Image: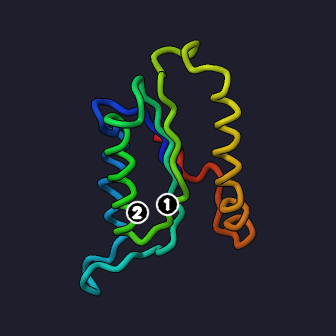
Amino acid sequence: MLFAAPVFCSGFPAQIKSLLDRMFCLMDTAGEQPAAPWRPGKPIGLLLTGAGDEADNADLVIRGLEQLTQWVQGRMMGHWFVGGCTEPEALGGDVESRATQFAAALAPEVARLEACGQYEPGRYPPV
């Protein structure tokens, strides 16, 4: 799963928060206690944008998703924060190359999922 969202007031927007709340369905809370994950090892990545810097802005969101990933026994594949997103012209020329690097870091996992028939492009529309 790749979560992509803007950061508002040091948190996810409501649509992403709702999705995260629904991640609890990845846990079998009726059976084994403490709750056991339905899909252990699920790869999870995070892409955030915001007007400020990562510190005191996106760091709490990143830490929260890392903790949730740990709880569902997923694998945090990485995160990338693009700061200074006040308008497209303010992003700078290195954003495209950094995006390519981030995608390249996630690509081996996507290839592994494709090889074992678990990757279904377009199955889940973006929120």
Dot 1 amino acid type: Met
Q: Are marks 1 and 2 in contact (CB under 8 Å)?
A: yes
Depicted 29 relative to depicted 125: above or below: below
Say what secondary structure mark 1 lies in.
Answer: strand
Residue at the spot of label 2:
69
Picture coordinates of residue 31, whole percent (x, y): 28, 85
Residue visible at 64% across and 58% down in the picture: 120
- Report crowding for label 1: few under 14, some 14 to 19, many 20 or more residues within 10 A (C-alpha): many
Residue at the spot of label 1:
76
Dot 2 amino acid type: Thr
The quarter of the picture where the C terminus appears is top left
Outermost bottom residue = 32
Quarter of the image for residue 73 reads bottom left
Could you say which is closer to the camera, residue 91 or residue 111?
91
Could you say which is closer to the camera, residue 121 or residue 89?
89
Q: Which mark is residue 34?
A: none
Between the C-alphas of marks 1 and 2, the distance is 6 Å
Q: In the image, is 4 to the left or to the right of 16? A: right
Picture coordinates of residue 84, whole percent (x, y): 47, 22
Residue visible at 39% across and 48% down in the picture: 62
Outermost front residue = 55
Quarter of the image for residue 29 reads bottom left
Q: In the image, is 46 to the left or to the right of 55? A: right
Depicted 108 relative to depicted 126: above or below: below
Picture coordinates of residue 25, whole percent (x, y): 34, 66
